[in-house]
Amino acid sequence: MTAVTSLSICDLAGAELADLTARGAVPIFFLVRLVHFTPVGRFGDMAQKVVTHYTDDLDGKDIKPGKGGEVRFSIDSASYVIDLSDANRRKLEDALAPFIAAARRDRGRSGRVRKPAQSGISAAELRDWARQNGFEVPERGRIPAEIREAYDARS
């Protein structure tokens, strides 16, 4: 029997592989490259359907559509994602329930905090008012807080 010690990249169709093994060669390692290309329009317009299949990360069982999915949680600034069935999700929620009940939500570190929108005067009008009242104000960019406070304090 002949041993084939290395084939770098082989494009082997089923018949070629059968011919190789029929001649007594035993492939020890080979890389098979399968290329499939169908131009649009060759067989008419084609549609693609992508199916996501979930497996419960805790028990390894298949998760039926609509009966579970991704669960995200964080602890000590580390975020986690786990795929769980509805039953295992309930187990996780039940286990964490006393801790969640005793905890308080941290809203400050979850992302960018937005300031409430300024009401009333536009930036251009505020710049004009500031110049008329002796303030130095830049043509562009942020308007200093003291100018906005002075405008709000006028009576």
Image: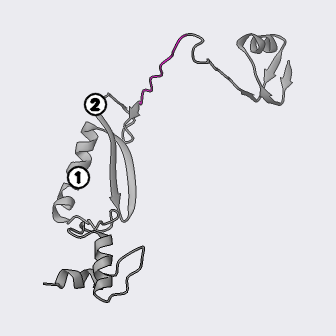
Which residue is at 37% across, 32% downward?
Answer: 61
Residue to which mark 2 is pinned = 66
Q: Which residues are magenta?
A: 44-52
Residue type beneath disc 1: Ala
Which residue is at 28% across, 30% downward?
Answer: 66
- Direction from residue 138 to residue 7 in the image, left or right: right
User: Which quarter of the figure has residue 119?
Assistant: bottom left
Name the residue at the bottom extreme.
Answer: 134
Q: Is residue 91 positioned above or below 144 on the image?
A: above
Which residue is at 34% across, 81% downward?
Answer: 144
Element at label 1 = helix
Element at label 2 = loop
What is the magenta segment's predominant secondary structure?
loop
- Quadrant of the snapshot with the N terminus: top right
Residue to which mark 1 is pinned = 95
Which residue is more in the foreground, 42 or 98? 42
Name the residue at the left extreme.
Answer: 155
Q: Is residue 46 positioned above or below 102 on the image?
A: above
Crowd around label 1: few <14 · some 14–19 · many ≥20 (10 Å): few
Question: Would residue 47 be counted in the magenta stretch?
Answer: yes
> What colour scheme governs how the chains and residues are painted in the rendered image of this protein?
one colour
- Direction from residue 31 to residue 36 in the image, left or right: left
- Quadrant of the snapshot with the C terminus: bottom left
User: Which quarter of the figure has residue 40?
Assistant: top right
Question: Would residue 123 be counted in the magenta stretch?
Answer: no
Residue type beneath disc 2: Gly
Name the residue at the right extreme.
Answer: 2
Marks 2 and 1 close (CB-CB < 8 Å): no
Residue 104, given in percent of the width and then of the height, sits at: 20, 66
